Amino acid sequence: MPDIQYRRLEENKEDLQKIVDFLIATFGKEHEMGSLSASKFSFAKGLPFVVAAIECGAWVAEDEGEIVGSIGLQINAPWYTEVQYIGDLWTYVTPEYREHGVAGRLIEIAKDHAEEKDVPLMMGIFNDADVDRKIKFFEKMGFRMVGAQFLKDKE
């Protein structure tokens, strides 16, 4: 059984570099959605989102100092109201750690963070792998489905 440690990312160059490297090397290779795939990661565009997530709240799961999972959050508000919510920019766990409760713990941390901020938490499934299993997982974690996303990719 791995000894997984969870910690909030800090606003420093070392943590920023570490999470960007992790997301590009892992999430970026696995997140396949046609023209919206993370393999097309733009460092210039992605960096401000990662920085904003660290400012709002981003956590990593580490095993012997190596990141094996992460969640990055951002403050949002629907266009039609001033009511804010926290949403995930990414939630990712490496394949070899998916049966160790890492995703569940990261989401519990996000739920606690949203509760501390007194705002709702909105989580998404933004890829097409194992969608039914992920829906059941979120429902088990206490979420309810409030919509869906559909992609009509360019030909």
Image: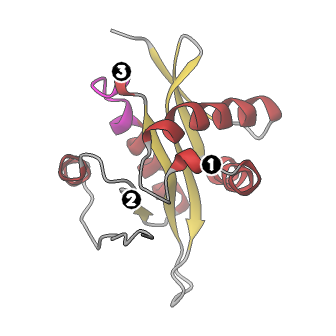
Q: What is the span of residues highlighted in magenta in the rendered image?
A: 97-105
Residue 77 sits above or below residue 42 on the image: below
Residue at disc 3, secondary structure: helix
Residue at (39, 11) in percent of width and height: 2
Q: Earlier in the sequence, mark 1 or mark 3?
A: 1
Residue at disc 1, secondary structure: loop
Residue 76 sits above or below residue 88 on the image: below
For mark 1, what is the residue?
41
Foreground mark, 1 or 3? 1
Residue 86 point in image, percent of width and height: 51, 62
For mark 2, what is the residue?
124
* Depth check, front residue: 37 or 52: 37
In the orientation shown, which residue stands out farthest toward the right? 13
Residue type at the position of mark 1: Phe
* Depth check, front residue: 119 or 130: 130
Residue 135 sits above or below residue 122 on the image: above
For mark 3, what is the residue?
96
Foreground mark, 2 or 3? 3
Using the rendered image of the protein, determine whether residue 70 is visible from the camera's viewpoint. Answer: no
Looking at the image, residue 69 sits to the left or right of residue 149; the answer is: right
Residue type at the position of mark 3: Glu
Q: Is residue 104 magenta?
A: yes
Q: Earlier in the sequence, mark 1 or mark 2?
A: 1
